[in-house]
Each structure stands twice: as structure tokens, then as C-alpha cells.
Amino acid sequence: MPAARRLKIGLSACFQHADPTRPLFTNKTLQYVEQSIAHWIMSAGAMVVMVPCPTGETARGDVTLAHYADWLDGVVMHGGADVWPGNYGEEPLREEWIGDRVRDLYDLAVVKAFAEVGKPIFGVCRGLQLINVAFGGALYQDLQTQHPGALQHRNASTYDQHFHDIEIVKGTHLSELYPDKPRARVNSIHHQGIKRVAPDFVVEALSEPDGVPEAIRLQSAPGRGYIAATQWHPEFHKAGSNTLDDTAILEDFLAACEKAKGNPRSTVHHMTSPLRERASRLLRRALARQR
């Protein structure tokens, strides 16, 4: 297929902040993508473009996230660092749960830019948590200490080979994608999780037996775009394994991108006002400091 006819999908950047002790790119800020998720999107024929943060101490020119949102057909929000609890009105309970406030501001601005032009958004792991917070939800800072009876959702040793079962909620869009799979097995690489679901979002899957939300979606309504996310990493699924096949999830997202490409919108469901203002007002100032 010619490049002009292929979908162009944005992939949010991961950050390695400036580090004077790093032997390569000493004291330079790095923005990058993880290979598996880029290849996952490309597996369906789409072209992947990293959406770099346009602000910071080395910023030049006038390119904005709004330009990327206008040009691209959709965006996938990467996994990675914890979300700063201050974004949902809490203080970090431990130093190691403070997250990455700089990346939060960038990610919030990416979600805002794509939502405002009605381009589909799909979140993976941290991406689910960030989307939930962006639209007014809250998180458990640590499932093991805050959620009674929680499973172990992250194992540092086994990493992407750590699994648990999920229940796909009946009557949801996800259940329509997997009509013969009321239950499935997925990877689990997170220690934070949804405590309060954002308004206007529905839970599409729950971990078993502890009931932690594992997939969410913005409820369909006039003027709302496609926003969905999974707590697991669909890109880590291996053909022939006993984990949930990622194909239907990816094809559904890309179909929404194709539909939006032919039917652009100007009005969609917006982020909650405090977070929208925070993303707009503080992004440049915070990233310029590059803490």
C-alpha cells in the first residue's frame, strides 16, 4: 500500500531526563519509544510517528502538539512511569511513587490536543492511568498497600511473563470484540491502578478476583471521539500463547482512526477544567526546568 494511503499513528514519547552521570548523551534529555509497541501498530500496516515534546530548554521553532494532532490520524499513549498523585488531588504516600511530573504534563497535553480535534486515543498501562486521571478519575498509588485483597499485579523478576485473569464485562464494546471470551488471561506489569473511574467512562474488563479495572472506554455519545485503554500491554502478546489475542483491539482502534480520518470533528468530550488548565498553563514552564 502506498504511504499516502496508510494511517499515520502517533506514539507518545517516553522520557529519560538529563543525567550528568550517563556516559552517552551526558546530561541530555532523551525522548524515545519502546520497540514492541511501535512494531505492534506497524503490524497492521500503519505508519508510526513518535510525538516528541516540543517544549524544554532546547526548544526551537513553532511546532506544537496541536500540529501533530491535526496531521496524524490517532495516537497511542505509551506505558512507563507512575502518574504523579498531585494530578488527582493526593500527596505521594512514598517517595518512590512520586512519578514523573514532567512527563505527566506532556502526556496530558497530548491527550488534550488529540481529543480536541476528535482523533482516536488508545492508552496502554500508564496510558490507561493517565487517561483516567486526565478526565477526572483517581488511582491507587499502590495496589498492594491500598486495595484490600489485591493480586500481585507486578513482578519485577518475571516482568512481561507475569499474568492474571480478567473478566470482560458483558454488554461493553470490548465484549463485542471478544464475543466468545468472557474471561481471558493477560500480562500484568503495574503496581498502580484505577481507584475511581473518570466520569463518562465505562469499565470493560476487571482483574480476577480482586476487581481492579483493566480496560476502560469513553461512553459513546454525539460529539465524543474514540478513547479507550487497557491496563495490560496488548503489544506483548505472542502468537500461540494462552494470553488474549491483541488483533481485535488493534484493528478496532485503527478502524476508528480510519473513520475519523474521513469524518473530522471539531467538538468532543473535553478534559476536566482543572487538568486542562494545568496542562495548558504549566507544561512549558515545567518542561523548561527539566527537573
Image (cartoon, helix red, strand yellow):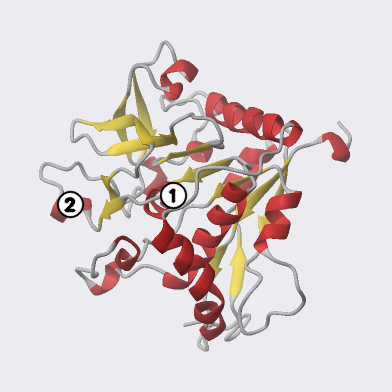
Q: Which label's residue is closer to the chain start, 1 or 2?
A: 1
| Viewer-closest of 146 and 70 | 70
> On the picture, is 209 further left or further right than 191?
left
Mark 2 lies on residue:
144
> On the picture, is 174 further left or further right than 43?
left
> On the picture, is 160 further left or further right than 213?
right
Distance between the alpha carbons at the discs numbered 1 and 2: 22 Å
Residue at 61% across / 63% down in the picture? Answer: 32
Give the amino acid at mark 1.
Answer: Ile
Residue at 66% across / 35% down in the picture? Answer: 257
> Which x, y percent locates residue 177?
49, 19
Residue at 68% across / 34% down in the picture? Answer: 260
| Viewer-closest of 140 and 25 | 140
Query: Residue furthest toward the top?
Result: 180
> Is residue 191 among what the camera can see?
no
> Is residue 286 among what the camera can see?
yes
Mark 1 lies on residue:
131
Q: Could you say whether the residue bearing mark 2 is in a helix, strand or loop?
A: helix
> On the picture, is 65 further left or further right than 245?
right
> Which x, y percent locates residue 151?
19, 41
Camera-near label (1 vs 2) is 1
> Which x, y percent locates residue 185?
35, 28
Q: In this picture, is 41 found above or below 103?
A: above
Q: Could you say whether the residue bearing mark 1 is in a helix, strand or loop?
A: helix
Q: In this picture, is 107 found above or below 122?
A: below
Quadrant where the N terminus sits is top right
Give the amino acid at mark 2.
Answer: Gln
Query: Residue furthest toward the bottom?
Result: 20
| Viewer-closest of 241 and 35 | 35
Query: Residue furthest toward the left?
Result: 148
Binning the other alpha carbons within 10 Å of mark 2 as few (below 14), some (14 to 19) or many (20 upward) gives: some
